[in-house]
Amino acid sequence: MLEKFFSPRSVAIVGASREQGKVGHEIVKNLLLGGFEGQIFPINPKATTILGKKVYAKITDIPAEEVDLAIIVIPAQQVKDALIQCAQKGIKSAIVISAGFKESGKEGAQRERELLQTAQEYGIRILGPNCLGLINTSANLNASFSTEMPPKGNIAFFSQSGALGTAILDWAVGQKIGFSKFISLGNKADLAESSIMEALCQDHDSRVILGYLEGIEKGQEFLHKARQVSKVKPIIITKSGSTSAGTRAASSHTGSLTGSDVAFEAAFKQTGVIRARTIEELFNYALAFAYQPLPQGPNLAIITNAGGPGILAADAAEKNNLNLLFLSKETTDKLAALLPPAASVYNPVDILGDAKADRYQKTLEVVLEDPKVHGVLVILTPQAMTEIPQTAEVIGEMSMSTEKPILASFMGEYAVREGIERLAKYKIPNYSYPEHAIESFHTMWKYRRWQEQPPLTYVSLDADRERVRQIIEQVRKEGHLEIGDLKAREILAAYRFEVPFSRVAEDSSMAVALAEEIGYPVVMKIVSPDVLHKSDVGGVKVGLKTPEEVHAAFHEIMAKVRKFMPQALIQGVSIQKMYDGKREVILGMARDPQFGPLIMFGLGGIYVEVLKDVSFRIAPICREEAQAMITEIKSYPMLKGVRGQKPVDMNAIVDALLRLSQLAVDFPEILEADINPLIMKESGQGAVAVDARFTISPN
Ligand SMILES: Nc1ncnc2c1ncn2[C@@H]1O[C@H](COP(=O)(O)OP(=O)(O)O)[C@@H](O)[C@H]1O
Ligand SMILES: [Mg+2]
């Protein structure tokens, strides 16, 4: 895939220039300096040679039969014509470096649409526009205007920001960190992260895929591709900036809780993509994945020559839910025999400040032999007796003969520099702070579990779709876009939710008659298309036990709502069976412009928007994802039951989430949904959706 971009046999540079410092010049220079062995055809109507290469006036003048790749660096207005010329020459791959497209405003956006149209018409794939180009170290191809080629290696990196890309390449050169490919995505008119990830998945030189993204346009495609690729190799992405999801004024709880970032967070969780919060973290993880094997388990042994860093490491381990107490008695006995009496033989193993290389070596040997150990972090602080480069050598040698990952934290800068360089030769990632090493190890372990997890199955649920279609049509005909109360319950019932028996009373004697029929206690609620949150206006009364109470409640509700909302159209008061509502949860749905339907789960009640203790996934979701949504919230222990309480029916929540997900997928016209609350019964007894609201689109 994308073979002609990454390994072209011949390249045309449209807009090659004789003038030093111009992009059209630098590209030719970089191609030559990079050692590209294919043919290079500079195109420029006014020149004869550039950097010793014969120049052609037009693309169609190129004498070669086939040209694999065009790099276009001419002004934006002329790019479309250049593409047509490419088509005439049979070129199917083009990197458009030129700026002046979507990034430059309305006119540019139109130009970009036309460019894409032309490309599609002629079957040309485009990288860019407004990009920096790409680098493939294994083909000695520097088709970018970044001056330096990073060393060969197995890290692939794609970046939506070109400038950040150059900074990182420079850093890589300085740190001698090897890259397989670098791809600047630019405006992503055609090729975007999904196709790039797919290509890198098949690339034997790339072991780990890194990305810097500001946004994802085709969310569902990303979900689909990333899920497949991440099973094969790790994808680590830093995402910055925000989408417009949170900017629309939302009337539902779910709508107001879906900020810009939750869709991304959910997308990363659902695809196994590792999210790095910062560029630093991105490379911390990258080095661990690129250099070391994945751990077979979570047990990390820590060896240190200083107490403080050992404690820092232990704290970080705890924060990452890594248990350190696993060394076998055999191992601690061996360590006790080997180390001075003042040493600590428990994890973290403190081999003391006077430890020389040989003590590190012997300790490492014993620890690695323990079958319970899945990985080792070696911490070194430069002290008077410390043999820094020798210790690095010792660690390096040991790493050659073990399948377990070894990470290092040689702390400091000046004194440890040579040690770190030696570690790098053996592909031992070094972290200036042990916390970062621990996080990286934990991330590797999490990734391994993701890779081993059996494929998830997404099933389609049975429902009365026709009924929902009718309701939506009817509501629209009546001129409404909000669906509450009776019709909302009908929609839920059509998707097999349990809903309470409920009837509307127009006067107080009818209310009493209905309550007698339903059985006490009952709940009474105002029925009005204008009232969104009924309790807020005194429109809900719960726990009514006698005809007198029902009678009084009817009048009270009417009076309150008339007082608070004199304009509201009141249709009556609904009488509902009362459930034991001690534990209530909220389920919701809102639509993200990039990823589509976002399903929300949280503890219900009036504090939901304050506490924001909610979890999200993008629909469709599967059973495992629904389960994870439940266990993820902080108040999960309350659902399991505290102080002798019995657990709620978790399966009922899972089922409800799956049904809501199905509804969201089936009806794109439902823009938002709130089921608040879903009243939970004890294990095995289900859950009742006592209140729901939907917002639909006008057409
Ligand atoms: N059938 C019911 N059984 C038990 N409690 C209920 C019932 N209906 C409503 N409640 C309680 O009353 C609260 C408010 O009612 P609800 O119908 O959700 O109105 P709104 O959210 O519009 O104020 C719910 O959060 C729940 O605690
Ligand atoms: Mg409610």
Image (cartoon, rainbow, N blue to C red):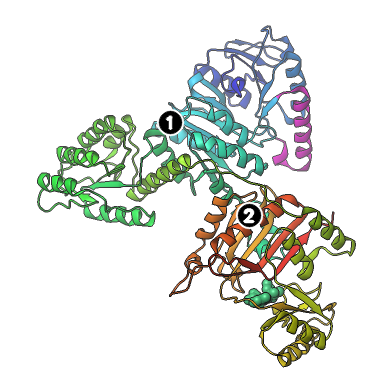
Viewer-nearest residue: 197 or 296? 296
Q: Give, as a single range, the part of the protein colored magenta.
A: 100-124
672 falls in the magenta region:
no
Position of the N terminus, as image quadrant, is top right
Would residue 259 be visible to someone looking at this image? no
Determine the quadrant in which ligand 2 lies.
bottom right
Closer to the chain start, of discs 1 and 2, is 1
Nearer to me, 307 or 413: 307
Query: Label 2 sits on what residue type?
Result: Leu
Measured as percent of width and height from the top left, residue 169 is found at 48, 33
539 to 101, vertically: above or below: below
Residue at the image position 54 percent from the left and 60 percent from the top: 630
Residue ID at (67%, 42%): 217
Residue 226 location, quadrant: top right
Give the x, y percent position of residue 689: 67, 67
Quadrant for residue 445, please give it.
top left
Which residue is tagged 2? 658
Q: Residue furthest bottom?
A: 548
Check the image and report above or below for 546 versus 634: below
Q: CA distance from mark 1 to mark 2?
A: 49 Å
Q: Magenta span has 121?
A: yes
Name the residue carrying label 1.
Answer: 173
Disc 1 residue type (three-letter): Val
Which of labels 1 and 2 is toward the front?
A: 2
Does residue 13 appear in this view? yes
Residue 374, labelled with which disc?
Answer: none
Q: What residue sits 73% from the left and 18% below the top?
A: 86
The image quadrant that residue 444 belongs to is top left
The residue shown at (60%, 75%) is 581
Q: Regarding mark 1 in the picture, which secondary structure is present there?
A: helix
Q: Secondary structure at mark 2?
A: helix
The quarter of the image holding the C terminus is bottom right
